[in-house]
Amino acid sequence: MACSIAGVLEAIGDRWAVLILRDLSLGLARYDDLRRSTGVTNATLSDRLKHLEGKELIERRRYQFNPERYEYVLTAKGRDIILVIQALAQVGDKWAISGNAGPPLRFVDRKTGHLVKLAMVDSQTGQRVRAREVLPQEGPGADDLVRWRLTHFRQ
């Protein structure tokens, strides 16, 4: 399918994989820590780690030889997913998913300590663009299905 969104979703896999990527982006790296943080079963965690490694989103590194133990780290591709995770957190905070106590996690600029948020910006001017002002257009990799979808877009 000629769809960047479908491709990223296929590489990630499912909600468990997103939670694993979240934890890796927060610095958790060891199997037991990932298991504790997500609450996922051993079988599911092992499966998702293998999937994410196969998609080159994470890398397994040995940190102990006897017995062999491994930790997991994000690759460059995996670090790209941090944007997706932060976007999900931002929407979840807007929807007050965690209740009225406020966001359970905040993202701040390391240098200033100021809160940061994701936004769409004009690639040339850097000016913020609101979602309702964004118009989808056919790209160079568009196929017939993409073009068909675009015929249904309502402004």
Image (cartoon, rainbow, N blue to C red):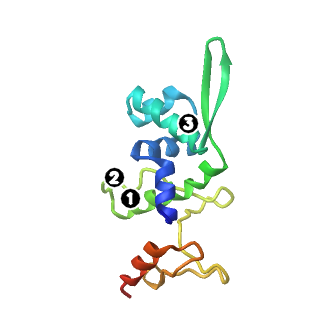
Give the crowd class for mark 3: few <14, some 14-19, many >=20 residues within 10 Å: some
The secondary structure type at the circle numbered 2 is loop
The secondary structure type at the circle numbered 3 is loop
Callout 1, which amino acid? Gly
Which quadrant of the figure contains the C terminus?
A: bottom left
Q: Earlier in the sequence, mark 2 or mark 3?
A: 3
Q: Which residue is mark 1?
A: 92
- In the figure, is residue 92 to the left or right of 2? left
Q: Which residue is mark 3?
A: 28
Q: Which residue is mark 2?
A: 98
When the figure is inspected, residue 70 is found, relative to residue 145, above or below; the finding is above
State the residue at coordinates (44%, 35%).
37
The secondary structure type at the circle numbered 1 is helix
Give the crowd class for mark 2: few <14, some 14-19, many >=20 residues within 10 Å: few
* Tags 3 and 1 touching, CB below 8 Å: no
For the view shown, which residue lies furthest in the bottom direction?
Answer: 155
Residue 28 position, x and y percent, is 56, 36
Whole-number angstrom distance, CA of label 2 to CA of label 1: 8 Å
Q: Look at discs 2 and 3 and give the one toward the viewer.
A: 3
* Tags 2 and 1 touching, CB below 8 Å: yes
- In the figure, is residue 17 to the left or right of 78? left
For the view shown, which residue lies furthest in the front direction?
Answer: 144
Q: Earlier in the sequence, mark 3 or mark 1?
A: 3
Residue 79 position, x and y percent, is 62, 51
Callout 3, which amino acid? Leu
